[in-house]
Image: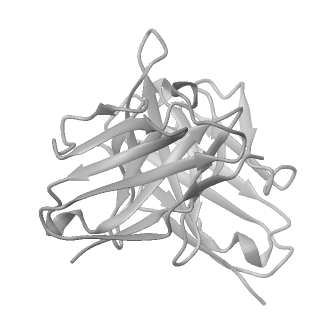
Amino acid sequence: QAVVTQEPSLTVSPGGTVTLTCGSSTGAVTSGHYPYWFQQKPGQAPRTLIYDTSNKHSWTPARFSGSLLGGKAALTLSGAQPEDEAEYHCLLSYSNWVFGGGTKLTVL
Amino acid sequence: EVQLVESGGGLVQPGGSLRLSCAASGFTFSSYWMHWVRQAPGTGLVWVSRVNRDGSSTGYADSVKGRFTISRDNAKNTLYLQMDSLRAEDTAVYYCAGFYYDSRGYYDHDYWGQGTLVTVSS
């Protein structure tokens, strides 16, 4: 089974920009892995922010964007807000699904 | 209002069994691929299992294959996870989630429940 890797933790200043990445032990992440990004706040269920690499839901703030970067899936937050402090999980599709370990994002 | 409500969690001894249920309402349950995802305390999400719309196709993570069985009853709008030979490392909050794909097979949206806690301990 593939292993999906994320930064365990990142810190961003309010108004700043940060990029979270999602790598695969099998090689480069491609659009064929249909990368998802979920946001999860304490005590809540996950909520999808980005799907199929870069697509957003109507509730996804415009400051979030998804892409492929250097062989990984990437979630970029531009103009961080205090309410963006959360755990972010990426999900890649193989024959089955595999989540990354999650990135705890601190806005400080 | 869309709801996914998990139940059946609790404390069980190693080697024991539990059956989780996920009751769906507010949407056309039979049109959704359903998944179980778990999260041990303080850790990330782990995909556990999935079932297609009519229950004819299932998939499992290697860590639960042969021990867990996913199923669904579209008449009752309910998803199940039968968990046997439970281990301490199965301790987690178990979420059910429904994913909808459009007529071309592209993802459209998803719904998640609030989770049920399973604790495996003697």
Name the residue at 62% across, 24% down.
Answer: B54
Where is residue A16 shown, x and y percent of the image? 18, 61
A15, B7: nearer the viewer: A15
Q: Is residue B52 above or below residue A22?
A: above
Q: Is residue A63 above or below residue A86?
A: above
- Taking the view exactly as shown, the residue that stands out farthest to the bottom is B122
Number of disc labels: 0
Q: Is residue B56 above or below residue A99?
A: above
* Residue B1 seen by the camera: no
Where is residue A95 shown, x and y percent of the image? 71, 32
Where is residue A105 shown, x and y percent of the image? 34, 68
A26, B42: nearer the viewer: A26
Quadrant for the C terminus of chain B in the image? bottom right
Name the residue at 70% across, 44% down.
Answer: B70
- Taking the view exactly as shown, the residue that stands out farthest to the top is B104
Where is residue B7 shown, x and y percent of the image? 52, 62
Judged left or right of residue A92, residue A14 is left
The picture quadrant where one finds residue A40 is bottom left
Judged left or right of residue B108, residue B7 is right
* Residue B76 seen by the camera: yes
Name the residue at 51% across, 30% down.
Answer: A34
Judged left or right of residue B84, residue A85 is left
Q: How is the image coloured?
A: one colour
The picture quadrant where one finds residue B101 is top left
B113, B28: nearer the viewer: B113
Name the residue at 31% across, 38% down.
Answer: B26
Quadrant for the N terminus of chain B in the image? top left
